[in-house]
């Protein structure tokens, strides 16, 4: 795959799961990776793992539910990148499930703040300077349940459906200036975050051709493709990486 040497990549939610696997992949391709999340010790461990393999990484803590913290993340990532962030992966997210009638109002605010508003603020802060330099790649992480209705997943799915539309809007806005904006739509994937789902994860995956949940690195492989020039003609795409679950 194309080398990312000289590039800086900010990956939100990279203290765990899909984001952590993506950080390792992009670092292996030569990018200077900015690992982010709230958990300092998990972030430090991800950075140490990348450096131990000869990669370049720094940890910048941020709370995606707090707009000031998101703005600081954009500023600090740009500084750490020597004045530029070339790749942004909007991966950090939360996925509470449950009956609509039992959903507290503040949970609605939190899901939309973390899953939508933080991504919006990061694109607003970083995409214009990518456009000025004439190149950049943004990959948003959505979900298969942004595409179809599933009982108890309306809040989560609707937040990611917003990100699907934003992917296409930002492709239209920034693509002509050389910034490619795409999304990966994972199916059920084994991560630290889905451990509490237990067998429900396998049941969710069972209906697809692969018949099993994905591994975080299988999602990261698709994210890395969209982040590199291998995907130079791909704009505004939402790539399902779900074992075929959406197709059947
Ligand atoms: P995970 O293991 O739970 O990791 C979530 C990451 O998001 C962690 O690094 C966490 O960091 C970060 N995060 C959560 N809330 C945050 C906040 N308020 N501020 C900053 N960082 C925050 O999740 P995952 O399964 O890898 O999922 C990653 C992405 O893929 C999510 O957007 C999810 O919706 C999407 N997805 C996952 C699946 C799946 O089956 N796993 C399927 C479809 C889509 P800290 O804990 O350090 O804050």
Image (spheres, helix red, strand yellow):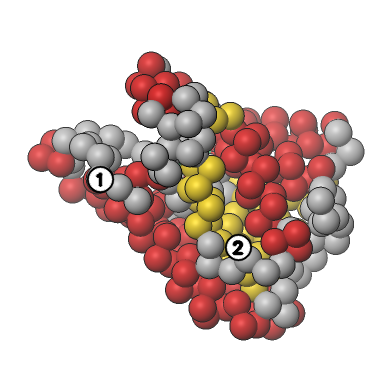
State whether residue 212 appears in this view: yes
Identify the residue at horizontal 42%, vertical 60% (top origin).
164
**Residue 191: x and y, percent?**
53, 28
Identify the residue at horizontal 64%, vertical 73% (top origin).
179
**Residue 117: x and y, percent?**
40, 61
Where 79 sits versus 155, above or below? below
Where 205 sits versus 54, above or below? above
What crowding class fits label 2: few (fewer than 14 Cα within 10 Å), some (14-19), or many (20 or more)? many
* Residue assigned mark 2: 138
64 to the left or right of 108: right
Q: Which of marks 2 and 1 is nearer the N terminus?
A: 2
Residue at the extreme left of the image, as rendered: 101
Secondary structure of residue under mark 2? strand
Identify the residue at horizontal 60%, vertical 62% (top origin).
138
Where 208 sits versus 90, above or below? above
- The residue at label 1 has a CB less than 8 Å from ligand 1: no
* Residue assigned mark 1: 149
Secondary structure of residue under mark 1? loop
**Residue 140: x and y, percent?**
52, 56
In this orientation, which residue lies closer to the viewer: 248 or 109?
A: 248
Where 66 sits versus 211, above or below? below
Tell me the distance, in whole angstroms, between the alpha carbons under discs 2 and 1: 27 Å
Residue at the extreme right of the image, as rendered: 54
Contact (Cβ within 8 Å) of mark 2 with mark 1: no
243 to the left or right of 159: right
Q: Residue 74 carries which label?
A: none
Residue at the extreme top of the image, as rendered: 199
Identify the residue at horizontal 65%, vertical 34% (top origin).
217
Quadrant of residue 144 in the image? top left
**Residue 48: x and y, percent?**
77, 33
């Amino acid at each position: 795959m194309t080398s990312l040497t000289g590039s800086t990549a900010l990956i939100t939610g990279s203290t765990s799961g899909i984001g952590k696997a993506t950080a390792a992949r992009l670092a292996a391709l030569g990018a200077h990776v900015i690992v982010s999340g709230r958990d300092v010790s998990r972030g430090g461990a991800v950075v140490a793992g990348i450096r131990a393999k000869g990669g370049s990484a720094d940890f910048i803590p941020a709370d995606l539910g707090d707009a000031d913290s998101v703005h600081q993340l954009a500023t600090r990532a740009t500084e750490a990148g020597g004045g530029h962030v070339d790749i942004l992966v909007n991966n950090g997210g939360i996925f509470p499930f449950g009956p609509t009638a039992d959903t507290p109002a503040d949970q609605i605010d939190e899901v939309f703040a973390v899953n939508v508003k933080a991504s919006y603020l990061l694109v607003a802060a970083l995409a214009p300077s990518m456009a000025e330099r004439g190149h950049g790649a943004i990959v948003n992480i959505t979900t298969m349940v942004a595409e179809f209705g599933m009982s108890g997943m309306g809040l989560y799915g609707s937040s990611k459906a917003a990100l699907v539309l934003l992917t296409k809007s930002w492709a239209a806005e920034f693509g002509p200036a050389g910034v490619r904006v795409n999304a990966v739509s994972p199916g059920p994937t084994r991560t630290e975050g889905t451990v509490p789902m237990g067998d429900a994860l396998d049941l969710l995956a069972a209906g697809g051709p692969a018949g099993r949940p994905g591994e975080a690195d299988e999602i990261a492989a698709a994210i890395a493709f969209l982040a590199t020039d291998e995907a130079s003609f791909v704009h505004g795409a939402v790539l399902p990486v779900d074992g075929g679950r959406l197709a059947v």
